[in-house]
Amino acid sequence: MSADFTRTCEGCKLVFSEPWAKGKTGYRCGAPGPRRGYTVGIERFFPYIPAWCPEMIKESEENER
């Protein structure tokens, strides 16, 4: 499993936004697990989906079936 550089976390139902420093908006992952709260963007989303994303792992497992 590796990061998906063809998509971003934008639109993911688990991502939440919060006020950041200097009036910016930060985006964090809300997926349950050890990486809950990790930052996935500030003002805009990172240009990839992290390899640890539970949704991406679940999608990969479903495709293996």
Image (cartoon, rainbow, N blue to C red):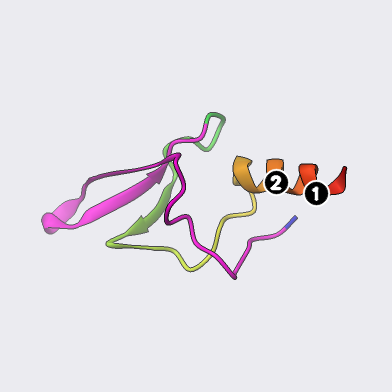
Q: Which mark, by number, is residue 55?
A: none
Assess disc 1: are there few (<14), some (14-19) or many (≥20) residues with their C-alpha within 10 Å of its C-alpha.
few
Q: Residue at x 75, y 49 (%)?
A: 60
**Residue at image coords 58%, 55%:** 50
Residue 36 on image: x %, y %: 48, 35
* Depth check, front residue: 4 or 36: 4
Badge number at residue 63: 1
Residue at (65% x, 48% y) in the render? 56
* 32 sits to left or right of 54: left
Q: CA distance from mark 2 to mark 1?
A: 6 Å
> What residue range appears in magenta?
2-31
Query: In the rendered structure, which amino acid carries the disc numbered 2?
Result: Glu
Callout 2: SS: helix
Residue flagged by tag 1: what amino acid is it? Answer: Asn
Q: Quadrant of residue 55?
A: top right
x and y percentages locating residue 26 in the rendered image: 28, 51
Q: How many marks?
A: 2
Please state which of residues 28 and 6 is positioned toward the viewer in this rendering: 6
Q: Quadrant of residue 17?
A: top left
> Which quadrant would the N terminus be assigned to in this image?
bottom right
**Image: 48 above or below 34:** below
- Residue picked out by circle 2: 59
Mark 2 in CB contact with mark 1 (< 8 angstroms): yes
